[in-house]
Amino acid sequence: MNESGSTFSPSARVFITVSLAVYFIIAPLYPQNVDYAVAFAFRSIVFLVFALMMAQGGWGWAAEAFRRSPVMWPATAGVVGSSLSLFWTPSLYDALDSFTLMLTLYILWFVLLLMNFTPRERVRLAAALVTGGVIASMWALYSQWIGHAALIEALKNNPMYDDVMREEMIVSLRANRALGRFGNPNQLAGYLALCLWPAWWLWKRTPGAAARTALGMAACILLAGVYRSYSRSGLLLVVLSGAWLALYEWRSRGGRVSMKTASAVAGAALLGVAALALALPPGSFGGRLMTISTIVARTHFYRGALLTVRDHPFLGVGLNGFEGYYAQYLRPGDLEARYVHNVILETAVEGGVAGVLILLWMLTVLVVSLWRFRRGSGEASVWAAAGACAALFALSLVDFHNRLAEMWLVPLFMLSLVHPPVPAPDAIRSLSKALRAAAFAALAAAWVVLAGLRYAHDAAAEQGYYLFADGRLAEARRAGEWAVFFAPIDAEGWNRLAQIWMRIPTEQGRLNWLSCSKRAVRWAPRRASLRADYAEALFTLGYRDEALEQIERARRLFPARPRYCQQAAAYYRAMQKPDEADRLEAEARRIQTQIEERKI
């Protein structure tokens, strides 16, 4: 194996390895989707480490890694295609956040690939992943033991969530499921199940009894966390992972693994799960084993996704475009969602046929590459890498784990262990000084836009939220203005600022309310709630025809929400048009009746 690690000074290697190990430990404790400071730190570390590598090894090294890694080609196509879809996405701010995640993971793969970790470093990083999972599981179990009463009370008065989402969260908390720091039992179970793969890889590499005992205890804690989350997807993933490991052990002991054998093992595992589900009492597994509400909800999401693909088949609706288009296909009583909860359908929605082809290209290259890597790496490592990648893909077929940075850590790390080493940079022609300077400038600019400004915006937005909740409008307004200064494309930021100006009883305050509402609609034109708020501002300031136009567009964007009919009816009644108002109020009652009848 080529020890390209000699390119780095000992202090550089220590910095890179320790930085990755620390993040691997804290990742499940401070998920990026709920902790913007950790998201900033993760992105900054990835950009910094990559810049350090390029400074010491040269950009030609990255070019060689790109050439030698088959996965890089479809991954690059996906990143480029996603960047292009930013031009037609209905929510640019949210789409840019998803693109930042993709680009950061793309650079992280470069980092893991170029490091060519020594055996000791590999063990330490794998142990860090397992340690993080164990701590996350123990925290979740402790939180479940003390109960969620305080959190439920806080949620009841939290204006950040709409009524439907708030009720769903409260129902989940009352079931006393283990949530972990993710706040979502399925995400916790998925991460813990993924951590079983580095634990098994360490088990195969560690002959000592003490170490194996510790790994066995760690696996038991991870499994306890999966069980106590009452996540059926997590439980099923554990069963299928066990079947995959059983195939490996059978093969390693001289058994022949054919398609017939693999199918028999997988079928036996699934039948075992079905038999267990029928044999257990109804209250087992938190009473969720036989519930169908989440399955019904996913049929709503998938129906909306298919209708969106039907109307936008070729290039899709852009990154994070599902929420903006799904609302118009909702029937009364269907559940709302930001994501499709299926990576294939979501790719079709966001990227159309082109996106699906890139995804299939990626999956094909990944399978072929793992098949080829088995000759140059330990077979256990290849099976662990294949299992981790398959686990993430399986989770993403029924949820949106692919949207979370933490879920990619185990598959990317395990995959880097079996990838052939990249030649040392002293044998590769590097870029010219001018091109090197341009490349570093582009990397720095990307960090400023995607990490630095995002952190400044999130910090100001959070401060503004708490100031607004405390009734300190002047300070909340200043914080909101800083938030939209750092992220002028954030529609929700403009809307929050508009709500603050609405409460300032001056003529200038009303004009600013109208201006901020208009900007919110500009950056998220398919969000019905923003158009309804804009209509309210227009109507209050006397622009009645424009207000009616906006509320009618809100009704077309979200026909299954009765409050837009009620809002339009109120406008018509104020304009002395009782017939139209009565018609809309009757429509609102009809929609509400259908919602109650179809409520899950």
Image (cartoon, rainbow, N blue to C red):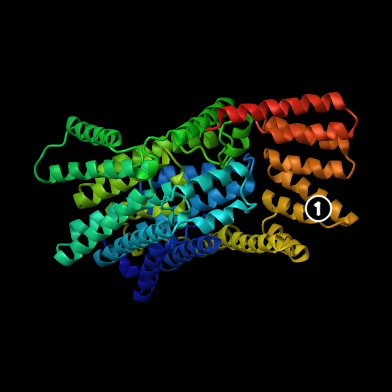
In the rendered image, the residue lying farthest to the left is 254
- Secondary structure at badge 1 equals helix
- Asked whether 591 or 351 is in front, the reply is 591
The kind of residue tagged 1 is Met
- Answer yes or no: is residue 333 visible: yes
Q: Residues within 10 Å of mark 1 (few under 14, many from 20)?
A: some
Seen in the image, is 454 located left or right of residue 508?
Answer: left
Q: Position of residue 560 (x, y in %)?
A: 65, 30
Residue drawn at point x = 72 percent, y = 50 percent: 495
Q: Position of residue 333 (x, y in %)?
A: 58, 31
Seen in the image, is 414 located left or right of residue 581?
Answer: left
Q: Position of residue 188 (x, y in %)?
A: 41, 52
Residue drawn at point x = 22 percent, y = 64 percent: 214
Quadrant location of the N terminus in the rendered image: bottom left
Circle 1 sits on which residue?
A: 502
Q: How many marks?
A: 1
